[in-house]
Image (cartoon, rainbow, N blue to C red):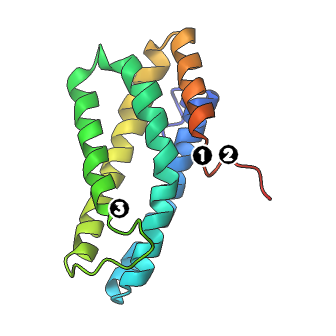
């Protein structure tokens, strides 16, 4: 994320950014697995990405996005549509099994390219817009959603 706007000074945006960073790190494990034909490994990584994105998406769609939708309805709708496309491909590996569709690895790689672009849109557009536009009450609502959703990165080490 940009360093100039101060987004990371807010706990909510810092947490969302750290989740983005973790997702990008996990995506980097997919290319070698894809090149080696390691569909089982790709499915494992897809489940890890899904675990990070589950609470992350909940915070965005039930906390952050509603607060911005009045001013940016088309952009928020497009981001939510991208969430559905990405979730759909990740969900194929949800049950713990390796997807049997031979096209799934390529679809996953396409979805992850979309996800990387999506992350940039959020970090360069949504997060600074939220910083500039959300009221204290709206930030409190975002925090309440985060508390309810949790997050894999915020959990204390066992």
Q: Which residue occupies the foreground of this view, 107 or 126? A: 107
When the figure is inspected, residue 27 is found, relative to residue 68, above or below; the finding is: below
When the figure is inspected, residue 143 is found, relative to residue 135, above or below; the finding is: below
Residue 98 coordinates in the image, percent (x, y): 37, 79
The CA distance from mark 2 to mark 3 is 22 Å
- Is any atom of residue 128 visible in this view? no
When the figure is inspected, residue 142 is found, relative to residue 70, above or below; the finding is: below
| Label 3: how many Cα within 10 Å (few below 14, some 14–19, many 20+) | many
Residue 45 falls left or right of residue 14: left
Q: Which residue occupies the foreground of this view, 87 or 114? A: 87
Q: Which mark is residue 90?
A: 3
**Mark closest to the chain's N terminus, 3 or 1:** 3
Residue 10 coordinates in the image, percent (x, y): 61, 27
The CA distance from mark 3 to mark 1 is 18 Å
The CA distance from mark 1 to mark 2 is 5 Å
Which residue sits at x=31%, y=77%? Answer: 99
Residue 129 falls left or right of residue 12: left
Write down the residue under mark 2: 154
Q: Are marks 1 and 2 in contact (CB under 8 Å)?
A: yes
- Is any atom of residue 104 visible in this view? yes
Choose top left, top right, bottom left or bottom right for residue 129.
Answer: top left
Which residue sits at x=35%, y=62%? Answer: 90
Choose top left, top right, bottom left or bottom right for residue 124.
Answer: top left
| Label 1: how many Cα within 10 Å (few below 14, some 14–19, many 20+) | many
Which residue sits at x=33%, y=39%? Answer: 121
Q: Which mark is residue 151?
A: 1
Q: Secondary structure at mark 1?
A: loop
């Amino acid at each position: 994320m940009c360093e100039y706007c101060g987004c990371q000074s807010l706990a909510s945006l810092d947490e969302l950014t750290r989740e983005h960073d973790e997702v990008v790190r996990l995506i980097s494990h997919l290319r070698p697995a894809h090149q080696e034909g390691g569909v089982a490994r790709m499915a494992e990584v897809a489940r890890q990405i899904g675990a990070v994105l589950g609470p992350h998406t909940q915070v965005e769609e039930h906390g952050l996005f509603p607060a911005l939708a009045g001013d940016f309805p088309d952009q928020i709708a497009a981001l939510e549509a991208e969430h559905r496309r990405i979730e759909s491909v990740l969900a194929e590996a949800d049950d713990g099994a390796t997807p049997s569709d031979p096209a799934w690895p390529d679809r996953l790689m396409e979805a992850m390219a979309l996800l990387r672009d999506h992350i940039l849109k959020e970090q360069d557009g949504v997060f600074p817009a939220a910083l500039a536009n959300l009221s204290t009450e709206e930030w409190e609502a975002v925090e309440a959603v985060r508390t309810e959703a949790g997050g894999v990165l915020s959990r204390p080490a066992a």
